[in-house]
Image: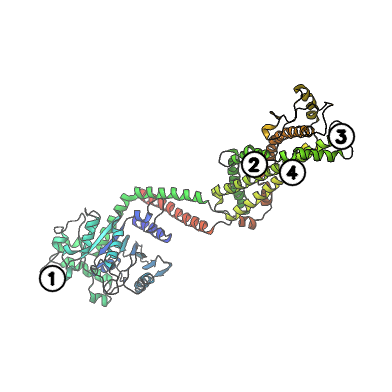
């Protein structure tokens, strides 16, 4: 069964591969930050590199004077079974195995230079290195640049603050275990590592103290006060380390031999012999591994909770972005139809009042159409001069005897022609509203946002359908006007003489409350048309004709004010609700797989984002299942 540390190492590597390291997701903290690891902190030349190499058992880190570690090195150790050959892998070169550790050292240096250049600059971008060996324990270590007090030539003046800020970003995390490296041949009170550790971990529960260079202390002195916790007390025991000397390094002394010699040093030391079982790099590695595993066990509920929150957040984001599109034509057709239905649903909600916008159609009928009808130039058309002109032209060479029927018809037909303008304008106004609602509905259909090509196709198809509905609606409202012209309501004119007789004679020019005056149309003159004394060619006679026509036109205007909206709704609004995409559906059904795929050609940035989230989701689910399995077994 895989150890918890090994599992966490795999999760961390997967996070690194997916770019989740150090950034995290928007909905929650980074999974990487929730996984415990050991941050190695120390001043320059404190022996950090030697400690790490002793733990690994391999000589693989760059060396030199001054600042050598210029980027964080995330070192993941994996214990292998049997006599499998040791090898290393870099996160930026996942398919290449390094069995020659001198090449590992070179790659660390080269990868550092790729970011910082061949200078003494530093970078917070980490290098990820995994080492697989039967001679290591499962452990994750982060080697950080050495703390320094002054900038040297080639470094900016801010280098001291920059390094400390970088180191703090690692050791301040509550899940970080601090491995504070201090040289024994310097006063512990001046240790940069312990100073920083005390600031971020004042209780000392996350700090492990390591004393290096015990063999380099002045004769007659020792570090027992520190190692036994009297000089500087921590919650965890101090560990002493004896690193290889520079001469050993120069001679490439075998690390296995160096470990044996370290054990012999403590076993035979008169000062540290009683502590020999708790000293040395091998003990340190086991101590850290055991502690790290115990910390991971304690953190498992929180880690699983974080993973579950991450899974929920990523699944919600995938739902928002839309799931991946199937490659077979049937599934693609189904997807397109579902997207169309989603759009159609929103469009109908606008029309029916579930969303705003449909009320503008009622505004066309309640305000725009009546206003247009009131502004028609009937006063000019039915003026005495124009009435006299049209009636006289209709009489021809022989004046009318009783009533100028042809003159009436010409006046009425001419008046009715004015209604075409408002009728067609109502159709155009509703068409404009419907087009706006289509555009708005497409924008509000979240599922469509990922498919700009389908959006354009839908807009074009809906636009063509609305044009067709508008043309049919115009034909219908024009027919309504023409029907009024083609057959006049004779009963209206037959009743006029009877009404005039009931009302009695009215002096010429009396305009009190004429019918139709509420519409701005002159009403009929109450002059008895059968009066034999009336001069049929007098001004009053033509005024009476104009008034009668005006009254009839008013009646027709009221009728059209009711019937035009009905025709428009029937031909445009109702058709848009029922069959806006009918022709589009027919065309879609005839398309082949390639043509369907073209419609589902989504925004590349959205596709890339979905793929990234899907990979991360897969990682989180696998991590949850595996952590659950390992946790239950243990």
Quarter holding residue 385:
top right
- Assign a secondary structure to mark 2: helix
Horizontal side, residue 183 vs residue 611: left or right = left
Mark 4 to mark 2: distance in Å?
A: 20 Å
- Disc 4: which residue: 475
Quadrant occupied by the N terminus? bottom left
Nearer to us: label 4 or label 3: 3
Labels 1, 4: front one: 4
Which mark sits nearer the N-terminus, 1 or 4? 1
Query: Please, is residue 311 above or below residue 166 in the view?
Result: above
> Quick one: label 2, few (<14), some, or many (20+) residues within 10 Å?
some
Asked if the residue under mark 2 is in contact with the one under mark 4, i.e. CB atoms within 8 Å, the reply is no
Which residue matches tag 3? Answer: 400
Q: What's the CA distance linking mark 1 and mark 2?
A: 94 Å
Q: Earlier in the sequence, mark 4 or mark 2?
A: 4
Mark 3: secondary structure:
loop
Residue at image x 89%, y 40%? 397
Mark 1 — residue? 218
Position in image of residue 412 (x %, y %): 78, 37
CB contact under 8 Å: marks 1 and 4 = no
Picture coordinates of residue 543, whole percent (x, y) = 76, 33
The answer to whether 446 is drawn above or below residue 504 in the figure is below
> Which colour style is shown?
rainbow
Give the alpha-carbon distance from disc 3 to disc 1, as whole Å. 142 Å
């Amino acid at each position: 069964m895989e150890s918890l540390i090994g599992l966490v190492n795999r999760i961390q590597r997967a996070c690194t591969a997916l770019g989740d390291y150090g950034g995290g997701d928007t909905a929650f903290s980074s999974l990487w930050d929730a996984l415990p690891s050991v941050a190695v902190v120390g001043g320059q030349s404190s022996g950090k590199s030697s400690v790490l190499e002793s733990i690994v058992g391999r000589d693989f880190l760059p060396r030199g004077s001054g600042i050598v570690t210029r980027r964080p090195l995330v070192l993941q150790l994996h214990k292998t079974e049997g006599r499998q050959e040791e090898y290393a892998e870099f996160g930026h070169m996942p398919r290449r195995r390094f069995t020659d550790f001198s090449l590992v050292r070179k790659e660390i240096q080269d990868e550092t230079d790729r970011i910082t250049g061949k200078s003494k600059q530093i970078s917070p971008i980490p290098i990820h290195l995994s080492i697989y060996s039967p001679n290591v324990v499962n452990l994750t270590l982060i080697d950080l640049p050495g703390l320094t007090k002054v900038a040297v030539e080639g470094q900016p003046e801010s280098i001291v603050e920059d390094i400390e800020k970088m180191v703090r970003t690692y050791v301040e995390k509550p899940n970080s275990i601090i491995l504070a490296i201090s040289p024994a041949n310097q006063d512990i009170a001046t240790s940069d590592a312990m100073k920083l550790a005390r600031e971020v971990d004042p209780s000392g529960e996350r700090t492990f103290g390591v004393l290096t260079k015990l063999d380099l202390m002045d004769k007659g002195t020792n570090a027992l006060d520190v190692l036994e916790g009297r000089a500087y007390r921590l919650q965890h025991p101090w560990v002493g380390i004896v690193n290889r000397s520079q001469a050993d390094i120069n001679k490439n002394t075998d690390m296995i031999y160096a470990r044996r010699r370290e054990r012999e040093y403590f076993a035979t030391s008169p000062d540290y012999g009683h502590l020999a079982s708790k000293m040395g790099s091998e003990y340190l590695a086991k101590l850290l591994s055991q502690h790290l595993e115990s910390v991971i066990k304690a953190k498992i509920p929180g880690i699983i909770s974080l993973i579950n929150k991450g899974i929920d957040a990523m699944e919600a984001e995938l739902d928002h972005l839309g799931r991946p599109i199937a490659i077979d034509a049937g599934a693609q057709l189904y997807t397109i139809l579902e997207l169309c239905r989603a759009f159609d649903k929103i469009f109908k909600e606008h029309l029916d009042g579930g969303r705003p916008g449909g009320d503008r159609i009622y505004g066309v009928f309640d305000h725009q159409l009546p206003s247009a009808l009131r502004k028609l130039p009937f006063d000019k058309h039915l003026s005495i001069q124009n009435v006299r002109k049209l009636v006289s032209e209709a009489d021809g060479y022989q004046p009318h005897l009783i009533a100028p029927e042809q003159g009436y018809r010409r006046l009425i037909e001419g008046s009715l022609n004015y209604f075409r303008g408002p009728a067609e304008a109502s159709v155009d106004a509703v068409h404009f509203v419907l087009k706006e609602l289509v555009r708005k509905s497409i924008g509000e259909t979240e599922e469509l946002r990922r498919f700009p090509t389908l959006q354009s196709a839908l807009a074009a198809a809906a636009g063509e359908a609305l044009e067709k509905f508008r043309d049919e609606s115009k034909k219908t409202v024009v027919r309504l006007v023409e029907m009024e012209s083609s057959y006049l309501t004779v009963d209206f004119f037959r009743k006029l003489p009877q009404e005039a007789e009931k009302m009695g004679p009215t002096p010429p020019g009396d305009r009190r409350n004429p019918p139709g005056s509420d519409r701005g149309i002159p009403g009929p003159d109450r002059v008895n048309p059968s009066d034999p004394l009336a001069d049929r060619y007098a001004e009053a006679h033509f005024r009476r004709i104009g008034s009668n026509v005006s009254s009839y036109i008013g009646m027709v205007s009221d009728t059209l004010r009711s019937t035009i909206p009905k025709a428009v709704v029937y031909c445009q609004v109702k058709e848009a609700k029922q069959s806006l995409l009918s022709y589009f559906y027919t065309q879609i059904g005839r398309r082949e797989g390639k043509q369907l795929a073209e419609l589902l050609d989504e925004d590349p940035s959205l596709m890339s984002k979905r793929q990234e989230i899907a990979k991360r989701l897969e990682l989180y689910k696998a991590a949850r299942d595996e952590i659950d399995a390992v946790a239950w077994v243990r």
